[in-house]
Image (cartoon, grey):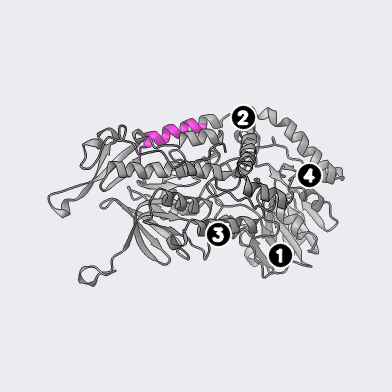
């Protein structure tokens, strides 16, 4: 659109959502259900799906039951298995985008390269690979499992074979008959190993730390079962509620009484013993830390695959690469044709943080240089009208992240309502004191958890050893903490109306004084109606 003198105007929207995985699509649905249609979803790839689009490796599947790993407002009675595979979850997300009319809002191939807070106009200036725009509010839903992490291994650049990360699987490269090295033993690796072991000539697994693995009781969901869930929705809701309730009851063992996990540890050892008969191999596969310290992995095929004659386990991390030979830290040498890295993601150092510049001219990465922290997992001090979905300390160790996402969507919806109540050109800035108080509470509770006391080093911990990823409580507790926005935790930022345009400057207004501003009402007295019941989790 051209302005005066033919100058091209920059597009402006009320809300810009970054990412189109569960968090981004969930935010888009919630915005529409709140009556907000002036928004865009910026997606760097050519389709929606987030991590379930990017991770298409052989055997990729979810370790949370299907009926719990879905939105409460978009139930799927036709899940084909109790634990869904990647194609089914990706198809579900495409279905959500279609069902809720999100396609017109989605901008594909629009990677965000920079976001800068414009303090004069109280809006975000957003640069993308397909153009620029501005937004009153940014909802960042890039997710913690979006940017693969590949270790800096000496000599890797000179490896003559094929190299790729599990989240960037090269489907054009045929592994059949090849000598393959799998680096890492996390959630992706334990699915990849049994999926490719029957086809490769030799598979060598480089294990720095063994995981605890429990059986994955997956099965097909029959036609009669699916029919029942379609015709009698309360059966589907009851199933979801039961899955949720069982996991809520398990939380105290992870967060308050780690010794109670001893029974689960015994079951994991028994699971290993059923498939691994070699005592020496069993010793290499037995972790030395408390179960639960790292995420407990689910697989009924992993241990049988390791017992195959063409599979070798190197109980040591990869140290260097010499041509086509991989050298482990213990000196073991293995010649391979291809290397697959299952080495996780940038979780505690999310790359998006380098692309967000706040009110003080500082990037979010600089602000978080001593560790990520936010208010209720959503907002950061110094970054007005900027929110994140699946932010610091919102991860889970035993349940569905969709529950946490929906709680954060409740918070997002109330945040936008409060902006409406305050009226005019306004922003909310999280008070540093509120952010610090919230994080002190979280870190104090974290001290007793198995993630901090279990004796392991995990991706839950940042470079300083702080657990900045996991929520130390139940999903019900988190929902209560994020149901509404407490304006006492925020400063209200307005644009002062000057006599002359060149004198325009932003002003900060204490929440208690917000009612004195033009067009504002006292938020403690006038509060919009509660969120629509359809967007609530209910029993789950």
State the extent of the magenta-drawn residues as a range: 430-443
**Spatial CA span between label 1 and label 4:** 24 Å
Which element is circle 3 on? helix
| Residue under label 2 | 252
**Spatial CA span between label 1 and label 2:** 43 Å
Q: Residues within 10 Å of mark 1 (few under 14, many from 20)?
A: many
Q: Which one is in front in this view, the residue at disc 2 or the one at disc 4?
A: 2
Q: State yes or no: discs 2 and 4 in contact (Cβ < 8 Å).
A: no
| Residue under label 4 | 284
| Residue under label 3 | 94
Q: Which one is in front in this view, the residue at disc 2 or the one at disc 3?
A: 3
Q: Residues within 10 Å of mark 4 (few under 14, many from 20)?
A: some
**Spatial CA span between label 2 and label 4:** 30 Å
Q: Residue furthest front?
A: 231
Labels 4 and 3: the sequence-earlier one: 3
Labels 1 and 3: the sequence-earlier one: 3
Q: State yes or no: discs 1 and 4 in contact (Cβ < 8 Å).
A: no
- In the image, residue 174 sits, relative to residue 487, either above or below, namely below
Side of 232 relative to 108 (left or right) = right
């Amino acid at each position: 659109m051209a302005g005066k003198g033919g100058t091209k105007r920059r597009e402006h929207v009320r809300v810009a959502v970054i990412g189109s995985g569960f968090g981004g699509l969930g935010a888009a649905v919630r915005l529409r259900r709140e009556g907000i249609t002036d928004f865009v979803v910026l997606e760097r790839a050519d389709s929606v799906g987030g991590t379930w689009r990017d991770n298409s490796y052989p055997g990729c599947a979810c370790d949370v039951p299907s009926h719990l790993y879905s939105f409460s407002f978009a139930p799927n009675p036709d899940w084909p298995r109790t634990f869904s595979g990647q194609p089914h979850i990706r198809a579900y997300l495409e279905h959500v985008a279609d069902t809720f009319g999100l396609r017109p809002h989605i901008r594909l191939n629009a990677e965000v390269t920079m976001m800068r807070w414009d303090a004069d106009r109280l809006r975000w200036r957003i640069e993308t690979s397909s153009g620029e725009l501005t937004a009153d509010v940014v909802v960042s839903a890039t997710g913690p499992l979006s940017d693969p992490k590949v270790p800096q291994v000496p000599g890797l650049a000179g490896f003559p074979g094929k190299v790729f990360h599990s989240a960037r699987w090269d489907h054009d490269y045929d592994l059949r008959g090849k000598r393959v090295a799998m680096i890492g033993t996390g959630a992706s690796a334990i699915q990849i190993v049994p999926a490719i072991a029957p086809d490769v000539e030799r598979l060598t697994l480089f294990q720095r730390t063994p995981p605890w693995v429990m059986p994955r009781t997956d099965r097909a969901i029959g036609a009669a079962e699916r029919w029942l869930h379609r015709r009698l929705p309360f059966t589907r809701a009851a199933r979801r509620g039961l899955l949720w309730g069982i996991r809520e009851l398990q939380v105290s063992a992870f967060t308050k009484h780690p010794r109670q996990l001893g029974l689960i540890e015994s079951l994991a050892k028994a699971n290993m013993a059923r498939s691994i008969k070699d005592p020496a191999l069993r010793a290499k596969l037995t972790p030395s830390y408390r179960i639960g310290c790292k995420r407990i992995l689910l697989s009924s095929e992993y241990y049988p695959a390791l017992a195959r004659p063409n599979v070798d386990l190197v109980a040591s991390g990869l140290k260097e690469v010499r041509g086509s030979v991989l050298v482990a830290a213990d000196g073991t040498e293995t010649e391979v044709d291809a290397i697959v890295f299952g080495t996780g993601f940038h979780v505690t150092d999310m790359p998006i943080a380098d692309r967000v510049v706040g009110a003080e001219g500082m990037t979010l990465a600089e602000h978080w240089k001593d560790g990520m922290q936010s208010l209720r997992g959503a907002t950061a001090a110094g970054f007005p009208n900027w929110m994140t979905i699946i932010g610091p300390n919102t991860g889970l160790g035993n349940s569905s992240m969709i529950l946490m996402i929906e709680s954060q969507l409740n918070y997002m919806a109330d945040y936008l309502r409060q902006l409406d109540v305050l009226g005019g050109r306004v922003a909310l800035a999280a008070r540093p004191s509120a952010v610090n108080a919230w994080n002190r509470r979280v870190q104090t509770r974290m001290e007793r958890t198995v993630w901090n006391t279990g004796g392991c080093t995990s991706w839950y911990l940042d470079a300083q050893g702080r657990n900045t990823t996991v929520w130390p409580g139940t999903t019900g507790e988190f929902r209560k903490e994020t149901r509404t926005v407490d304006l006492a935790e925020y400063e209200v930022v307005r644009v002062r109306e000057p006599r002359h345009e060149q004198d325009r400057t932003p002003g900060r207004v204490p929440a208690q004084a917000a009612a004195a501003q033009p067009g504002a009402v006292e938020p403690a007295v006038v509060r919009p109606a509660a969120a629509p019941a359809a967007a609530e989790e209910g029993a789950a």
